[in-house]
Image (cartoon, rainbow, N blue to C red):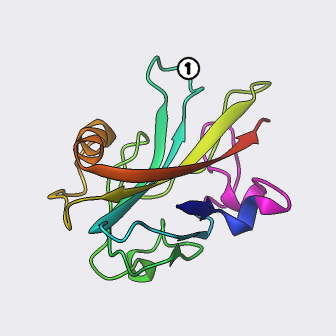
Amino acid sequence: MQLAVPDLVKDGFTNKFIYNQFGCQGENISPNISWHNVPKDAKSLVVTMYDPDAPTGSGWWHWTVVNIPVDVTALERSAGNNPDLLPKGSQVVRNDFGVASYGGPCPPEKSDHRYQFTLYALDIDHIDVNEQTTPALIGFMVNSHLISKATVTYNYSR
């Protein structure tokens, strides 16, 4: 399985994709993400954006989209902020900012952080969630049904 974040390939995280609180003044728009070569036995997909370097002791979940149909090959720009742009049946769940939306990077000043975009292929067609389901619970369900995953990492500092 291969994963790409075309919006970030050339210039990385530009102001368009940066969070708009905690001292950051970005537009907080989710980038587009694309993938291919999903395993034939996959029944659904999950996409996450995670910062393992956040000073929390457990990282920071910026974005989680579950129940993506396996015939879908991309999430378009702004899909993390506009549910109408999500593939049919897909759902964004709560991030560590406490909202069911994309939350862009905003690391502490003078701190370089890694932001991991991961695509998970699962052996189940649906994860029963609502907008308040925590990223930790999603992680448990994903790892219990994982067939394959692909990750791409981008760094950002301010």
Question: Is residue 80 shown above or below 97?
Answer: below
Q: Position of residue 107 (x, y in %)?
A: 66, 33
Of helix, strand and loop, which one carries label 1? loop
Residue type, numbered disc 1: Pro
Residue at the spot 45% in from the left edge and 68% down from the top edge? 38
**Residue 10 is a magenta residue:** yes
Question: Is residue 53 shown above or below 146?
Answer: above
The residue most toward the top is 57
Please indicate whether residue 89 sits to the left or right of residue 71 in the image: left
Q: Position of residue 154 (x, y in %)?
A: 71, 45
Q: Quadrant of residue 2?
A: bottom right
**Residue 64 is a magenta residue:** no
Residue at the spot 31% in from the left edge and 41% down from the top edge? 139
Q: Quadrant of the C terminus?
A: top right
The residue most toward the right is 10
Magenta region: 9-29
Reading the image, the residue beneath label 1 is: 55
Residue at the spot 20% in from the left edge and 68% down from the top edge? 125
The residue most toward the front is 40
Label 1 Cα crowd, 10 Å radius (few <14 / some 14-19 / many 20+): few
Question: Is residue 41 shown above or below 24?
Answer: below
Please indicate whether residue 142 sits to the left or right of residue 109 in the image: left
Please name whichever residue, 36 or 5, is drawn nearer the observer in this view of the structure. Answer: 36
Residue at the spot 85% in from the left edge and 62% down from the top edge? 10
Question: Is residue 61 shown above or below 85?
Answer: above
Q: Position of residue 76 (x, y in %)?
A: 56, 77
Q: Position of residue 106 (x, y in %)?
A: 65, 39
